[in-house]
Amino acid sequence: MLPLSPIARPPAPGASSQDAAIPYQNPFFLFTEKLLALNLLKVKVMHKLLILYATQTGNALDVAERLSREAERRACPVGLLSLDQYDPSLLPQEQAVIFVVSTTGQGDTPDSMKVFWRYLLQRNLGRHWLKGVSYAVFGLGDSGYQKYNFVAKKLDKRLMDLGGTAIVERGLGDDQHPSGYEASLDPWMSSLWRMLNMIKPQFLPNGPDVMIQDAVLIDQPKVQITYHNSENLESRFSSTSDLTCLSIQIGSARSVHPGKALSDRSTPGCFLKMVNNLPLTRSNCGKDVRHFEFEFVSHALQYEIGDVLEILPGQDSAAVDAFIQRCNLDPDSFITVSRRETDDHNAHDSRIPVKLRTFVEFSMDVASASPRRYFFEVMSFFTTAEHEKERLKYFASPEGRDDLYQYNQKERRTVLEVLEDFPSVKMPFEWLVQLVPPLKPRAFSISSSQSAHPNQVHLTVNVVSWTTPYKRKKKGLCSSWLAALDPCDGILVPAWFHKGLLPAPSPSLPLILVGPGTGCAPFHGFVEERAVQSRTTATAPIMFFFGCWNEEGDFLYRDFWLSHSQNKGVLSEAKGGGFYVAFSRDQPQKVYVQHKMREHSQRIWNLLAEGAAVYIAGSSTKMPADVTSAFEEIISKENGVSREDAVRWIRALERCGKYHIEAWS
């Protein structure tokens, strides 16, 4: 083959002798060089194991990153992308792809997967579209939900229908397992590497079990931190308003964090000010549920009933300071953060340097979330105490998985608590930024109608607290922070509005609502909205089934529901609707919402036959499945059809957008 070297051209008239040294690229050679480079690039891409993930809360990203690390340890070239970063038309060109996908809500696809999934459902993709492509699917779900790991199951089937070949049987991680999703991830990964080595040995040149020394891989984190001269930075925002300054601080801190989830939620959509913090439960009833009312600080944003409000919680100042001190950091230094492997080397240059303490406060969850297993593995490289090193290595090993789960996840130990338990660990800040869970906004169903409260938004929040297996008292970060806010203090609350899973119904649509406990939150807004609509137009009836422990302790919004169920209100039987409440603990035998539904099966069926839509909201444990089962039983009984036909009836309601579930754990 001819050498593809540049050919020197003779100097042009009047040119210097230096010009003669400028290489002349023969067009044929130039074309050949480009073709060869493209072929080499194609070979490189085709022999790279591709890992694609779709996450909603971060678990699928954690699994995908772990798979990527395990591949690197086996000298396997690997690419890692979120599904919304990948062009699905390129899928037939891949040799091997691993999908890690979570299931959200009641069998819903994560937001980052929606475009990819729509592409895969195109009818013009034939049965041989993915011929020659090997794939594997690992799903993350919760068996407490009716559609457990539904997204992973339907993705696996679709890839197979399109001609793909499964490397290994799909793996299904279950949050309900005593060891969490890792209980199934570890054996699944072992099978994956073994089978991949059999069918695509070029990916694992040293075999499935030969590992590169961890010390080589631990050498550099994926994050780099640039420290800036603090002169003039302190006074940069001195002339701006407090609101603008806070917005810039939060946006800067969260935009420089390397986590993609944070960049999507960097600058707050708005700021709210709490004007009411009202208890809805009696102090001795065993739970603390609050009604929070917020006003828009700058300008009112439009929202609909059924929408969701996300709030960025404040972290305890003492915990933030303790973390900074424990890690021997300078809270007043100014930093920017970027990923080492980014293609755009100037990406972080345009970012505004942010004070280190501000960065920790608004982007690193140091006192609420539990670290992942990899955190313990990295810690083992930065400890000077031998007994701590042994314990950390054990926790990071497959043998120590269950003990780590008991110590860490079950106890909900925070990053700060873990670091305090291993005092000899001196982890570089770059690794902490990479591995500390990001501070995420918490989502709440909106419980108000903007038609009734033009400049406000209301929430119904259960203030979470619990005792761990080792009798340690723990509190939910956001709910306890909100509960402690005094409306007189005027604290600004960063927030975002989003569409929820409960679409706003038209005034003419009959409704059957089921919302025990704080599941009543969105329906408080539904009833407010319809009450406003009923003043100017004819509205369809609403049946609402509410449930709580007892009438005196936790009958949330008692006066509100009763007022609208009387005097021809929107919940009144006189208007064709009704309000029915189940007090589960006011009698020896438990009574739940599904029991009340069966008592009124004829009226439920009459509304369904008139075209009513069903809305269910509340705990994700057994309630949605039990309520759906009650609907199936009612349809079977009142319509005189088999249970199988009743199930199909419910599925038809789902398909036409008249059966909605919003559940949370």
Image (tube, rainbow, N blue to C red):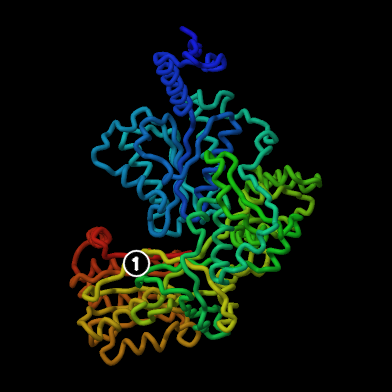
- In the displayed image of the protein, which residue is found farthest to the top? 1
Q: Give the residue displayed 67% in from the left and 59% down from the top.
A: 232
Q: Which residue extends farthest bottom?
A: 567
Quick check: can you spot residue 413? no
Q: Is residue 128 above or below residue 225?
A: above
Residue in the foreground of this view, choosing between 649 and 465? 465
Q: Which residue is drawn at 41% across and 74% down?
A: 300
Which residue has dot 1 on it?
502
Q: In the depicted view, which residue is nearer to us: 547 or 206? A: 206
On the image, the x and y values in percent for residue 316 come to: 65, 69
Q: In this view, does 651 lie to the left or right of 332?
A: left
As drawn, 352 above or below 92: below
Q: Position of residue 518 (x, y in %)?
A: 45, 74
Residue found 55% across the figure and 73% down from its top: 492
- Give the secondary structure at mark 1: loop
Q: In which quarter of the image is residue 476?
A: bottom right
Asked whether 351 or 504 is in front, the reply is 351
The amino acid on which the numbered mark 1 sits, given as a three-letter code, is Leu
Task: Locate residue 109, reporting x and y percent.
Answer: 38, 52
